[in-house]
Amino acid sequence: MATVVTTEQIRALWDAPSPNATIDRGDHYPPVTKDDLGALASELETDDEGYPLDDQWELLAAQLNGEAPDEPTSTVGQDLLDEIRDARIERDRIKAEADEKFNALIRAAVVSKKASVIAIAEAAAMSRARIYQIRDGRR
């Protein structure tokens, strides 16, 4: 189980002079770095200098501790995640089919000798080496 990260630890890390400062989260979790805080803070309300407002430290702690405000129920959240995975799988399938069709066109164009490899490469926005790789089935 991860060590709970407190708002005091987050503020101390934020203000730490060393860019290598971290918050230890236990043996099975990576430490929290200043870069981690910066990435999370990009979604927070800050003052003119980029320092999180007082009420935003709790949100950072909640994010680091795996909690999210207004998190959907586990069933609804899991359904949404399943839908995202299914969409990604479908996108990858369509992309693979399109890539194979594209590669077949490249191979046919090279074999037909109706256009030079240089012209095919320019039309495909690829290098000649890549065209030959496709022709030879190396990629």
Image: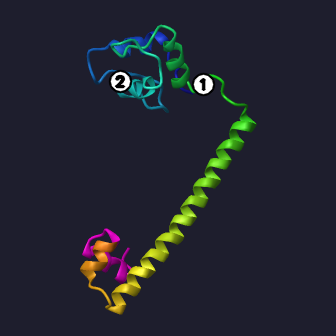
What residue is rendered at 43% in x and 23% in y? Answer: 41
Instruction: Please name the predominant secondary structure of the magenta segment in the image.
Output: helix
Q: Quadrant of residue 48?
A: top left
Which SS class for mark 2? helix
Q: Which kind of residue does numbered mark 1 sit on?
A: Glu
Query: Which corner quadrant holds the C terminus?
Result: bottom left
Density class for disc 1 (Cα within 10 Å; few <14, some 14-19, many ≥20) is few
Density class for disc 2 (Cα within 10 Å; few <14, some 14-19, many ≥20) is many
Q: Quadrant of residue 40?
A: top left
Residue 103 at what x, y percent from top left? 42, 77
Q: Quadrant of residue 71?
A: top right
- Provide the residue designation for mark 2: 34
Mark-to-mark CA distance, 1 and 2: 20 Å
Residue 65 sits above or below residue 78 on the image:
above
What residue is rendered at 32% in x and 73% in y? Answer: 123
Q: Which kind of residue does numbered mark 2 sit on?
A: Lys
Start and end of the magenta stretch?
A: 124-139
What residue is rendered at 29% in x and 24% in y? Answer: 20
Residue 84 sits above or below residue 94 on the image:
above
